[in-house]
Amino acid sequence: MSYTIPLDCLKAGESAQVVDIDGDTTLLTRLQEIGLNVGSRVRMVLPGSPCIISLAGNQFSLRTDDLATVFVEPSLTQ
Amino acid sequence: MSLAVDRVPHLAVVGNPNTGKSTLFSALTGIFTRTGNFPGVTVEMKLGRLKTSTQEAVLVDLPGTYSLAARSADERVTVDVLLGLRPEIGSLAGALCIVDGTNLERNLYLFSQVRDLGLPVLLIVNMIDRAEKAGISITAPELSQRLGVPVVFCNAHDQSSVALVQKSIFEFIAQNPPAAQGTDLAAQQASNSDFPPPFETAVNELQGLLSTHGRKMPRPLVSRLLMDIDGQIEQTEVQRWPELSPHLQRLREQVSAAGYRISGIEPRVRYASIRKAIAGLEIRPVRQAGQFSEKLDGWLTHSVFGLLVFIFMMFVVFQLLYRGAEPVMELMETAFGSLQDLVGAMMPRGPLRSLVTQGVIAGVGGVLVFLPQIVLLFLFLAILEDCGYMARAAFLMDRLMTKVGLSGKSFVPLMSSFACAIPGVMATRVIENRKDRMVTILVAPLMSCSARLPVYSLLIGAFIPGVSFFSGWVDLRSLVLLAFLSLGAIVAIPVAWILKKTIFPGETPPFVMELPPYKWPSIKTVFQRVYDRAAAFVVRAGTLILLTSIVIWGLGYFPGDHSRENAILAEMEETNRVSDGLIERRDELQQKLKGTNEVQPSSFYARWIRSQPVVKRKEAGEIPPLTPAEIEKIEKDLIALNQQIKEYSNLMEQLEGELVPTQGQLQENSFLGMAGHWIEPIVRPLGWDWRIGVGVLASFPAREVIIATLGVIYNLGEGMEAESPQLRDALVNSRNPDGSPVFTIPVALSIMVFFALCAQCMATLVVVAQESGSWKWAVFTFVYMTVLAYVGALITFQVASLWW
């Protein structure tokens, strides 16, 4: 049983796997360049706008607003 | 270019941000590097020499980036340098790609882009110690096998590791001689491309299309043109040849129709091939460093506590900035003053001397005095940046900045502008969004810099009553000062908003920024950053400022007849010389007179020496007592001398009294003075007379010049300080021809509002031109701020006149 939510709905400390990214091409490319890909694992460090996420051990601050939505599948093991 | 064969091989250094690229670069090349500037863009590229006893290479350090997809002119430069298209660098022997061993997947993305440009690439896997701890289990030869390029593992903090990298670089150069590599990248075919055949077909077709229209473009660039939708390459190429747009659209649709959606094709293709290449190598993210950082972040990025820490930090930085820089600035001012005197004494009077002392030395000195402040500010910024705090500050401020359509990255440059707009404008380089960066550059000069302070303190001291409230805790003057200090920032909010809506339209840019782990700042990195910035300021701004200072000097000096002024000055110098001689003689005599009573007879030694013969007493350093007749003569001489000195001092005063109106007259009749009279009808509605008009015109190079100019115009002579009571009184007592005072509270307020909002600072305008890449924007800044200042001063004067 898995469910998909937007990245900004993750709570602090929750981990998830990226299942889909949608929105403005330029921004999408930029997100992928920093390693936010379908299949990447992310952890929410500080929710909000902007939020802080942890991606493969690196911290990124992110505010994508209406330009892009990152859909994730929270890990149940967390 | 066949020259490439003979010269020292040049290698580009590329890598993601926070991969230790700078550390490795300075470990390889040493501290002193040359910063290459590119006309029209602001990319900083450092050139350093890599040397052994027998071999030499030049490393070109390109800005850290995640990708070569060019979204701005600045990013495009990186691609052009790699392709050997920038004449400043020329063709490259190869590229060194530095990647973070703990995050291979993401880092190899840039590597695969660089490799596809057709350059030989040496892959340097940095932070290998941490990667090994995290469980990476591959050797350099194995990785080299998988990726098809030479690989060297490295730990930039380890000397022996750096030596190994150096050895590998020279081996790499030997394997890829520049001659064999050739410069004809344009003819290169996609040999082992990861991209699907329909894409490559489209690239071929596009390249053919372009070349039939007279545009020979390297194949890798054509490939980027096709996949970077609406990127910088597309924008410039379409500008060159507008019919390109439909062709591009057709080709992109053609690739999409073949089953490969062009949007996002690059990350899909590259990550797929990277994952295949490093399959089985995935390592667990390193946590040791991350965990401490995360804990600290819990506090420092907290919406309340983090903000408090931030405010406290800024408070400390500003305190140190004002207090730390002030003594050095004063010292420099004194030094330039003495230099003026020294050079003045060596040259004959006349226009040339005036040009050198008043134009060149005063002009350059006026700019260089800001250097201590700039260096200090960059020192703080470099420390905060290198330890990782700056990214957090930008994160904290993002919420605030989005309200005017900017992102958190604009905050630090704007804050720096409170000390001085020059480093502030230069600090906008961290903003990668071009529109954002432009808006930030254009509003930065509105922030109240330290040069406005002397103007405020003079006028507030003269015209704002020293009333205090709350039993002396708050006084009116400091409240008014605070109001003026915040005025620019308050006005900047609507200005930024309007600029964002009109000239630089676009949504609030997305904010994607890496928060590097906290670490101790490296002295080397900090030093280098400060040195680069300071050197850039001195060299770039200095030349143009010198030119403008000379022009303004000329406008203030000509076409007046300076013979009367020179005659007075000559007489003053002569008077001074004679009077100095007299004073010396008087001091000598006084000493002689005093010497007789020098040793008091109360001491045992004195009583003993008095009993000795004259010769012995002379040896002991005591002058024998003078005879009463001698004393009488000396006293007589002294009276005569004092009389003469007094006469000369009266003469001096008289000369000065003549000089000052003469200088004032000259100033009034100079081109500048004429302009002052000419603009009087324009400044009248602000409550100003022609003299204030001249002051404002003359202070175009720098705001604080108005103090010296007012000093001259109000016949007080140059060298007036904002604090000098004479100037203050002169302002208060100055009268219009009809007897009404020139300066009233509304006039003072109007001048202060004008100076708060105007762009009277040449150095800033020069830097705006340099950083925005065009003089157009400097002119724009000057015009919009002057209009704003004029309207602001007009409203202030008209409204304030209703009360006073």
Image (cartoon, rainbow, N blue to C red):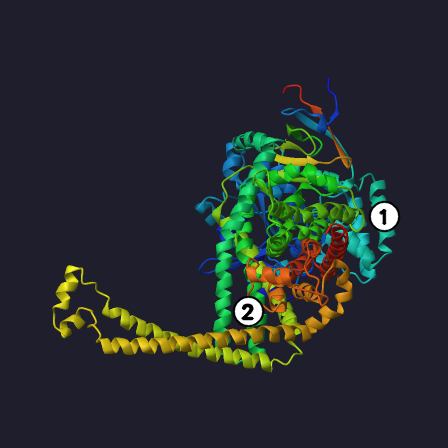
Return the residue at label 2. B361
Foreground pick, B95 / B295: B295
Judge if badges 1 and 2 mark residues of a common chain. Answer: yes
In the image, which disc is placed on residue B160?
Answer: none
Q: Is residue B32 left or right of residue B66?
A: left
Q: Going 60% across and 32% down the picture, which residue do you hit?
A: B280
User: Can residue A25 be seen?
Assistant: yes
Residue situated in front as seen by the camera: B42 or B373: B373
Label 1, secondary structure: give it: helix
User: Which of disc 2 and disc 1 is earlier in sequence?
Assistant: 1
Whole-percent x, y for residue B475 in the image? 59, 44
Closest to the observer, B588 or A4: B588
Q: Position of residue A55 (x, y in %)?
A: 63, 33
Chain for disc number 2: B
Quarter the N terminus of chain B occupies: bottom right
How many numbered dots are placed on residues in this image? 2
Q: Is residue B172 visible?
A: no
Name the element at disc 2: helix
Amino acid under disc 1: Gln
Coordinates of residue B189 in the picture (x, y in percent): 72, 53
Task: Residue type at mark 2: give it.
Answer: Ile
| Chain at numbered mark 1 | B
Provide the residue designation for mark 1.
Answer: B249
- Report the residue that reaches farthest toward the top: A1
Specify whether B112 is left or right of B473.
right
Vertical order, A6 against B661 (above or below) = above
**Image point 75% across, 66% down: which residue?**
B680
Q: Residue drawn at (47%, 45%), measured in percent from left and top?
A: B161
The quarter holding residue B4 reads bottom right
Task: Please identify, in this view, whether the residue under mark 1 or under mark 2 is nearer the observer.
Answer: 2
